[in-house]
């Protein structure tokens, strides 16, 4: 064989090695190992108290704070609470250790686990500085989660204001390019998560990620054992969101169980028994946070709706045991 031809073949094969390695990474991403059968523990995503938490941030005599949200959860029978980062003092900066440890002890005294936290980030943005800021924020809150004893930090897989959608955020870049932005940023966050024992939980939010296959495709591209799915049951915008939920349940480390299937007041209400059956079939063992939203409903009362939804979830867990 001529030396020049042999060299050309070697160089061509070498050029393909990074792609082959990426394919191995994608193929290696597998469902989370589950043992001993399903075990579901209700939690509350504190975003359910959005209006009351915001009122309290403006006037401490009004609304509710994170300590009060913990009190409510214990009173009505939750096992845990998912404490979204937006409602901590000083967000997006990490709160002082004294505040974190007081909250952690308060929850412990009430018999509540802290099932997760979450921040805002935009990894679809064309501007690398915007993506880098999101990485820094998630890294900071991974360390917050570790101090709280929370196992997960939620990361968005979608655009954030001021952008209306991922196409605008990315400057109409090809989808594969934007997925690459996401995968690289999430992989860096997951590396940091591994150092602190905190999983990066990637949430579908109805923009870049609209379906289960898109959600799973992103996670496979990230290819990191410390990056997994947060399944938002109200944000798979397909004809059969239950099929998307069933696809993603084996990869889930956290949930946002919504009242309706599109997070809109006029969309179909969740069939809680059907949903819990799907989660059980995946063998999931862990927290299942619910999240209520006002959805522009008149006379919406978060305390009433949270309690109603908790009872519905508890009944479905009992009925499917």
Image: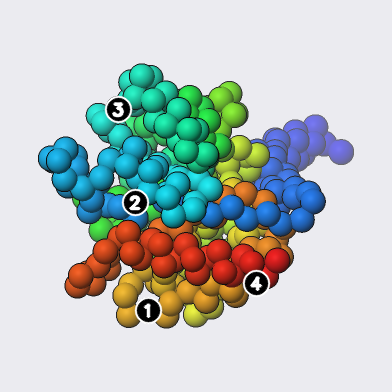
The answer to which of marks 1 and 2 sits earlier in the sequence is 2
How far separated are the C-alphas under marks 4 and 1?
25 Å
Considering every residue shown, the one lying at the far right of the view is 1
Closer to viewer: mark 1 or mark 2: 2
The answer to which of marks 3 and 1 sits earlier in the sequence is 3
The answer to which of marks 4 and 3 sits earlier in the sequence is 3
Closer to viewer: mark 2 or mark 4: 4
| Residue at which label 3 appears | 93
CA neighbours of label 3 inside 10 A, class few (<14), some (14 to 19), many (20+): few
Label 3 SS: loop
- In this rendering, is residue 99 above or below 219? above
Kindly identify the residue that appears in the image at 63 percent across and 60 percent down.
Answer: 249
Whether residue 127 appears in this view of the structure is: no
Label 4 SS: helix
How far separated are the C-alphas under marks 1 and 2?
20 Å
Quadrant containing the C terminus is: bottom right
Considering every residue shown, the one lying at the far front of the view is 75
Q: Which mark is residue 319?
A: 4
Kindly identify the residue that appears in the image at 26 percent across and 31 percent down.
Answer: 89
Where residue 306 appears, as percent x and y from the top left, is 38, 61
How far separated are the C-alphas under marks 4 and 3?
43 Å
The answer to which of marks 4 and 1 sits earlier in the sequence is 1
Label 1 SS: loop
- Residue 198 figure quarter: top right
| Residue at which label 1 appears | 267
Label 2 SS: helix
| Residue at which label 2 appears | 47
The answer to which of marks 2 and 4 sits earlier in the sequence is 2
């Amino acid at each position: 064989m001529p030396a020049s031809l042999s060299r050309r073949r070697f160089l061509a094969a070498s050029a393909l090695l990074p792609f082959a390695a990426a394919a191995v990474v994608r193929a290696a991403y597998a469902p989370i190992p589950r043992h001993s059968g399903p075990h579901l523990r209700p939690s509350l995503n504190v975003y359910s108290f959005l209006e009351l938490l915001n009122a309290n941030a403006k006037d401490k005599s009004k609304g509710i704070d994170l300590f009060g949200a913990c009190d409510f959860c214990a009173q009505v029978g939750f096992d845990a609470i998912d404490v979204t980062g937006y409602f901590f003092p000083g967000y997006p900066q990490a709160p002082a250790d004294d505040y974190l440890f007081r909250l952690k002890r308060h929850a412990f005294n009430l018999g509540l686990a802290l099932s997760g936290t979450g921040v805002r980030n935009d990894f679809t943005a064309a501007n690398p500085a915007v993506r880098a800021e999101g990485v820094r924020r998630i890294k900071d809150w991974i360390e917050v989660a570790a101090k709280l004893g929370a196992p997960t930090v939620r990361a968005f897989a979608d655009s954030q204001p001021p952008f209306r959608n991922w196409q605008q955020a990315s400057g109409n870049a090809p989808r594969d390019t934007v997925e690459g932005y996401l995968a690289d940023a999430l992989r860096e966050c997951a590396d940091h998560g591994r150092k602190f024992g905190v999983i990066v939980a990637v949430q579908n939010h109805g923009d870049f990620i609209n379906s289960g296959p898109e959600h799973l495709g992103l996670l496979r591209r990230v290819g990191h054992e410390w990056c997994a799915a947060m399944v938002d049951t109200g944000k798979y915008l397909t004809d059969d969101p239950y099929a998307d939920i069933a696809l993603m349940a084996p990869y889930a480390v956290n949930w946002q169980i919504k009242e309706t299937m599109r997070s809109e007041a006029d969309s179909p209400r969740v069939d809680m028994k059907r949903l819990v059956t799907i989660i059980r079939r995946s063998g999931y063992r862990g927290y299942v946070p619910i999240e209520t939203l006002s959805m522009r409903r008149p006379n919406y009362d978060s305390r009433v709706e949270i309690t109603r939804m908790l009872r519905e979830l508890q009944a479905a867990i009992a009925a499917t045991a």
